[in-house]
Image (spheres, rainbow, N blue to C red):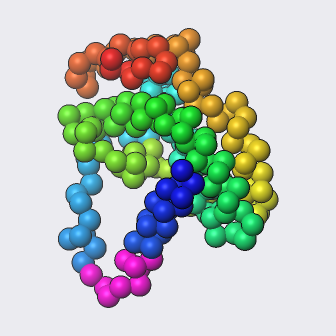
Amino acid sequence: MKRAFAGILTVLLLASAQAEDGAPRDRAALAPAALEIRPGHLGYAFDQPEILLRQRLFGLAHGLSLLAASCLDLPGQSAPIQDAYAAWHVRQAATIEILVHDLAAYYFGPRAAEARWPDLVRALNLTDSIQPALGPVSLEDACASLPEAIVRPRYELDKLLAPDAAPAPPDTAAGPTVPPAPNPQRVDE
């Protein structure tokens, strides 16, 4: 599992580095067209508790992925981070899939199936760097504490996506009504 995680991160980082180091190209021609966010759905849905909960949990998952990726280059941190993150991701994969599915439906409506992680990051206006979130904490300290922190209740997304969360009011202007569902079901099931 940790080899797969390291391999995926390595491929993504190498692809990014090669794109940066390669000859200048028309990046707009190479990049797929960005999905259009449904009107009135940019940012956080403070008036829809079920969606807001999913947005917050997606933000946690995104932050953990950024931190784990940043830690891989630190001597002595790579193996413990890979192990801890891979174990956490295995436990949370189904919940992360639900979050991505539900948020894609919320932000992109009929084009939800085309949405990918970066589309949701853009829709939520999340950063692509962990540095701003660290504040005065060094990357080394954050990485050293990650294996211990990631097993705490704060990162148990499956438990945080609880069935006792307040149901969201129907959004009739955005299409069909989506009833709230108990954890770990998707919002639209």
Q: Name the residue rendered at 64%, 36% in the picture.
A: 155
Q: Which residues are magenta?
A: 16-25
The one of 35 and 20 positioned closer to us in this rendering = 20
Q: Name the residue rendered at 22%, 39% in the picture.
A: 111
Q: Is residue 101 depicted above or below 19 in this figure?
A: above
Rendered location of residue 143, percent (x, y): 72, 57
The one of 92 and 34 positioned closer to us in this rendering = 92
Rendered location of residue 16, percent (x, y): 42, 72
Left or right of residue 89: residue 143: right
Rendered location of residue 120, percent (x, y): 40, 45
**Residue most toward the bottom?**
23
By secondary structure, the bulk of the magenta-drawn segment is best described as helix
Q: Is residue 16 depicted above or below 175 in this figure?
A: below
Corner quadrant of residue 88: top right
The one of 155 and 129 positioned closer to us in this rendering = 155
Rendered location of residue 189, percent (x, y): 33, 17
Left or right of residue 176: residue 140: right
Say if residue 132 shows up in the picture.
Answer: no
Q: Name the residue rendered at 32%, 88% in the picture.
A: 23
Q: Name the residue rendered at 58%, 47% in the picture.
A: 86
Q: Is residue 24 depicted above or below 44 in this figure?
A: below
Left or right of residue 26: residue 79: right
